[in-house]
Amino acid sequence: MTIAVLDFGKTNTKLLVLDTDGSVTFTARTRPVWKVVDGMSVLDDVALAAWVRKALDAAEAERPGEIQGVMVSAHGCTFALADDRGLVRPILDYEQELPGELVATVAAELPPYAETYAPPRPQGFNYGRHLVWLAHLEPAAFDRATAILGYPQYWSWRLGGRQAAEYSYMGCHSHIWAPARADYASVIGAKGWRGKLPAFARAGEIVGSTTIGGRAVAVHNGVHDSNAALHAYRSLGQRAFTLISTGTWVIVFNPDCPLDALDEAFDMYCNVDVDGRAVPTIGFMGGREFDAIAADFEGVVARQAIQRVIEAGCFALPAFAAAGPFGGQPGRIVPELRDPAERAALALLYVALTTDFCLDTIRSNNPIIIDGGLTAGGVLAELLAQLRPAQSVAEGAISEGTAAGAAALAFAAHGQAMTLPSPVAVQASTYVGLDAYRRAWTAQLPALGQSERSAA
């Protein structure tokens, strides 16, 4: 028995078929197309749906009869307005900015940070902002819509499931969820939208069926991608730990951080796990910022290049993306580097130092588990282990943490448990001068981060 996990990322979408031991038996990948329609960036859902069907058929053809369910995980900040037949408008790109004339109007209608723990962010990084905007911009679309669906729930429905809601996605820094009381935020009642929100189903619950290779298989209610990774490690019996989930985003979850420690000035927010429990979180677009600094580099970062960058005193100073503790600040490299290997090393040092900053800010003093795409080669984990000697650091041994967590939720609906490998302890790197390099980097941070960290 296997589960097919469709992992919808912002820049890459994958189909991964997983066995109960976490091994991946089939993989297919594509890049979703975001196109401009009527001046707005929206998803080409038709092209992506065609790829999904083709990929599922290819997986079935390779090992007929093994797939018993299709599970969805997806990036945050995205929603679908639908009726009982399909979309009533294209799915909006979360990086679509609001026009200036509506910014203040929308901001005035959003709930306060103390209610949602969703900091004010640009574009649609809190998807409640986009919902309120579209309600002003396209009221007819809202009138036609009978359902507001989270992005993974849209795909579960499109595959053949019923329309449903799910805790980890509703509570994913959305402006529409109040984590402390585990209910929708005040904006939902104020806008009269509660009737457009489907009943909740747990992530992984069977919500319908689809046909692959002429036979029916279960469709499972989808999950927020980073929360799926959190579930994967909790399913191993891990309890008190900080999870760093890496990819386009570096997301730091510390369930032990008190809610009253969250600070909107640092872009801190609250996720909600698959059981509806609050999970204090901080994050930045580490994968995207790595690419911005490293340019066209491909491959594993060389450890020798990291030492050379430290000795040269070259720094990447935040930020190179719109979100995170320093989002909106102009990123810069001082002095400029041209060697591709050293640019990549500089990029990884930047990710490590920003992650270290986030760990301090979210009061992480428990064991650390790091997972995801930026861990290739082990260098990032080694850097964090050296930067944080008081905490143990382990690297996920699961090849695809998000997919494994999503699959575990789906397998559970069939009465099956996964036997995933435990995280592997990381030996700290021994770069000479790394502590002094961190102090010099911190001293050059934008004023907000520097003053606040000094006071912490």
Image: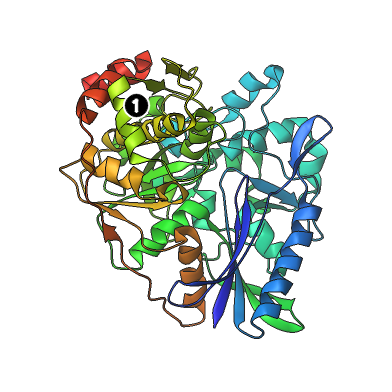
Task: Locate residue 97 relative to residue 240 in the image: left or right.
Answer: right
- Please tell me in which quadrant of the rendered image residue 1 appears: bottom right
Q: Position of residue 371 (x, y in %)?
A: 39, 53
Q: Is residue 203 visible?
A: yes
Task: Locate residue 255 relative to residue 39 in the image: left or right.
Answer: left
Residue at the spot x=40%, y=57% of the render?
A: 230
Residue at the spot x=76%, y=67% of the render?
A: 54
62 vs 48, nearest the viewer: 62
Q: Position of residue 58 (x, y in %)?
A: 71, 72
- Please tell me in which quadrant of the rendered image residue 394 appears: bottom left
Q: Is residue 163 visible?
A: no
The outermost residue toward the left is 390
Q: Position of residue 447 (x, y in %)?
A: 36, 13
168 vs 143, nearest the viewer: 168
Numbered circles on residues, count: 1
SS for callout 1: helix
- Image vertical order of residue 2 relative to residue 115, above or below: below
Q: Position of residue 202 (x, y in %)?
A: 51, 66
Residue at the spot x=20%, y=44% of the render?
A: 365
Circle 1 residue: 309
The type of residue carrying mark 1 is: Val
